[in-house]
Amino acid sequence: MPYPSQVNRENIIQQAWQMIEEEGVQQLSLNKLAASLNIKAPSLYRHVSSKADLLQAVNLLTLQKLFTDIASTIPADKPPLEQMTAVLHTYRQFALAHPHTYELVYQYNPAARPDENILVQLILPIQEIIAGVTGPDNSLAALRGALALAHGFVMLEINQQLQRGGDLDADYQQAVNAYLNGWQSP
């Protein structure tokens, strides 16, 4: 536990991220967060202006962690199709490993949405990879569809709505393969 003088915005955001991941966003209160940092709740306001500001920072941290994980698993020596497959598998693994913070990113709350310019910078390298599969003219549409496929699948999985048996890993692989193969440029 950090000393109060060592509490900074980064510590607060990381602690909030951890608490949300362990207990869900509904259980996060500024009082509990402050207590976990061994400070009083009003001290948090030196570093975050509101709970919405805190959630926006948590969402940005989640996305940064997601894209860091993705970047670390892209096989640079493989063709774009294999790279994009790795991206989509890492995306799913991250979402399943961090369901509460992942879901928070996609809850409709405009005040908690990170800056659009930062989000674009995070996704551009992925769009470059999928452009290698689809060609540059189709890359944005293909990227949107790939993210929708991955997000939809993992949300159904997180919410335990895929209950008819079978191997979800194999089903996801099959869906990813079918989707990406359908976009391959001639």
Image: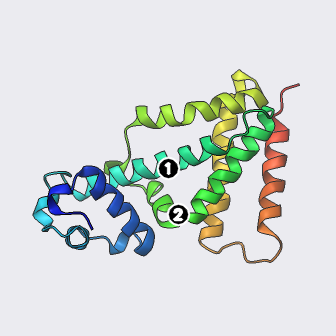
- Evaluate if marks 2 and 1 touch, with contact meaning CB atoms under 8 Å apart: yes
Residue identified by numbered label 2: 98
User: Residue 52 location in percent, x, y?
Assistant: 27, 55
Rendered position, 97 above or below 23: above
Residue 105 lies, in percent from the top left, at 45, 54
- The answer to which of 156 and 57 lies nearer the viewer is 57
Q: Give amino acid for label 2.
A: His
Question: Mark 1 is on which residue type?
Answer: Lys
Which label's residue is closer to the chain start, 2 or 1? 1
Residue 47 left/right relative to 58: left
Q: Residue 51 placed where, x, y %? A: 24, 59
In the rendered image, which quarter is residue 25 located in?
Answer: bottom left
Nearer to us in this view, 46 or 144: 46
Q: Residue at x 35, y 49 (%)?
A: 110
Residue annotated with mark 1? 65
Task: Depth check: give the residue in front, 113 or 83.
Answer: 83
Quadrant housing the C terminus: top right
Q: Categorize mark 2 by other alpha carbons within 10 Å: few (<14), some (14-19), many (20+).
A: some
Left-right relation of 180 to 128: right
Q: Quadrant of residue 12?
A: bottom left
Could you tell me which quadrant the N terminus lies in?
Answer: bottom left
- Dot 1 falls on a residue whose secondary structure is helix
Vertical arrangement, residue 179 with respect to residue 13, above or below: above
Residue in view at x 19 percent, y 72 percent: 31
Q: Tell me if residue 11 comes above or below residue 118 in the rendering.
A: below
Q: Residue at x 70, y 22 (%)?
A: 136
